Amino acid sequence: MRLLHTSDWHLGRGLHGVDLHEAQEAVLAQVVSIARAEEVDAVLVSGDIFDRAVPPVASVRLWSDVLGQLSALGPVVVIPGNHDSATRLGVGADLYRDGVHIVSEASSVGSPIVLRDAHGPVAIYPIPFLDPDMARRVLVDDDQVLARSHEAVLTAAMRRVHDDLDGRRRSDPATRSVVMAHAFVVSGSAAEAVRSDSERDIRVGGVESVASSVFGGVDYVALGHLHGSQRVDGERVRYSGSPLRYSFSEVHQAKQVLIAELDAGGLASVRSLPLAQPRSMASIEADLHDVLGSPQYERHTESWVQVTVTDSARPPDLQARVRERFPHALVVRHVPASGPLVGRRTGSTEVPTQPSEVAEAFVHYVTGGDITPEELAVFEAAYEHVLAEGRSA
């Protein structure tokens, strides 16, 4: 069985004020073309179809159009991510044509979509994004409440998966299994996962990661959430990554979809197929003389660029002069080479975007010192409270 794995479309998202709708149309047309050319047996979309709970009308129409094209080729299985509204995404799911499976409810975890090939059944277990504050009461069969963590709710979800899968394998030992999930999954330590600035923080109680060992015992795990395509546990646990670059931290990421093939013994191979980007992206850091005159930057004149000018004093008319050479410059800033930028990450040109990092940078800017653990705890508690209120609204 041949499966196309994709995720994190983020329809409706912009890039520093630029509308990405046409770019999203272009990359999703490639996804459809690949599905057709590869003659895939099913398409798996592992969450974050939209960038926000109430997406623009044009994005909804694009989703409907692409879903229609993909479902004409074969089954499509979809789960919501942390950016999606699970309720809105799942509205009318029972009315879609046969072969379109939008699984948005935590209560449905453990009930697979079963496909068949020449070797027998393949059970696909969709696990929608599980907010611990909501799911910890849904995934238990009694009055108990799970621990307030992503790992606890996903462990409970996988317990349901294994209960069902074990029964199916007793009836038919040829049954193979695929799990879809949207989470921050790591192998060993969070440092092993490659993150992007465009990914929303999903931490609860200060923790957002889940060990890959939670997903043991299945043939393939199709993950969403991280925007860079990467392996977590060999070929078996994979992120497809987003089809489009959504921040300058993704400049060097090769965007792609994954083709996972199952044979009689389980996972046979995983191939990466590239997605051409509608416009290239670059990050340039140099003094203004080099930015405007160096031949090495000529290839970026039509790219989306982030330009960091390092002159000791801010040059006059900086924005206009840079944009004269780079008409698609989205970020232009002055960071003297002789001094640090407040809030700048060590060894990086990216401004902090995770809430805790912004808080740390702000305290350092105001006080000149580091944030204390107590102050950070108060901030994180307040931030989580606001997130929880937003999710329940």
Image (tube, rainbow, N blue to C red):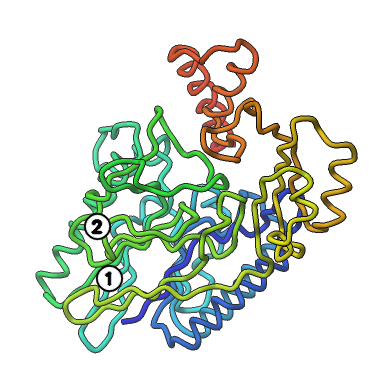
* Disc with the residue nearer the chain's start (1 vs 2): 1
Total numbered labels: 2
Marks 1 and 2 sit apart, C-alpha to C-alpha, by: 10 Å
Amino acid at circle 1: Ala
Quadrant of the rendered structure where residue 190 is? top left
379 in relation to 41, above or below? above
Give residue 135's quadrant in the image: top left
Where's residue 338, x and y in %? 66, 28
Q: Quadrant of the N terminus?
A: bottom left
State which quarter of the image contains the C terminus.
top right
State left or right for residue 10 relative to residue 222. right
Residue at which label 2 appears: 161
* Residue 340, above or below 393: above
Q: Is residue 354 left or right of residue 140?
A: right
- The amino acid type, in three-letter code, at marker 2 is Val
Say what secondary structure mark 1 lies in: strand
In what element is the residue under mark 2?
A: helix
Q: Position of residue 298 (x, y in %)?
A: 74, 63
Circles 1 and 2: CB atoms closer than 8 Å: no
Q: Residue at x 60, y 40 (%)?
A: 349
Examine the rendered structure and indicate whether residue 92 appears above or below residue 322: below
Q: Quadrant of residue 110?
A: bottom left
Q: Can you give x and y, in whole percent of width and height, for residue 12 in the image?
A: 68, 57
Given residues 343 and 169, the one toward you in this image is 343
Q: Residues within 10 Å of mark 1 (few under 14, many from 20)?
A: many
Mark 2 is surrounded, within 10 Å at the Cα level, by few (under 14), some (14 to 19) or many (20 or more) other residues, namely many
Residue at (85%, 41%) from the top-left corner? 318
Identify the disc placed on residue 123: 1
Q: Residue at point 71% right, 59% down? A: 297
Across and down, in percent, residue 140 comes to 27, 42
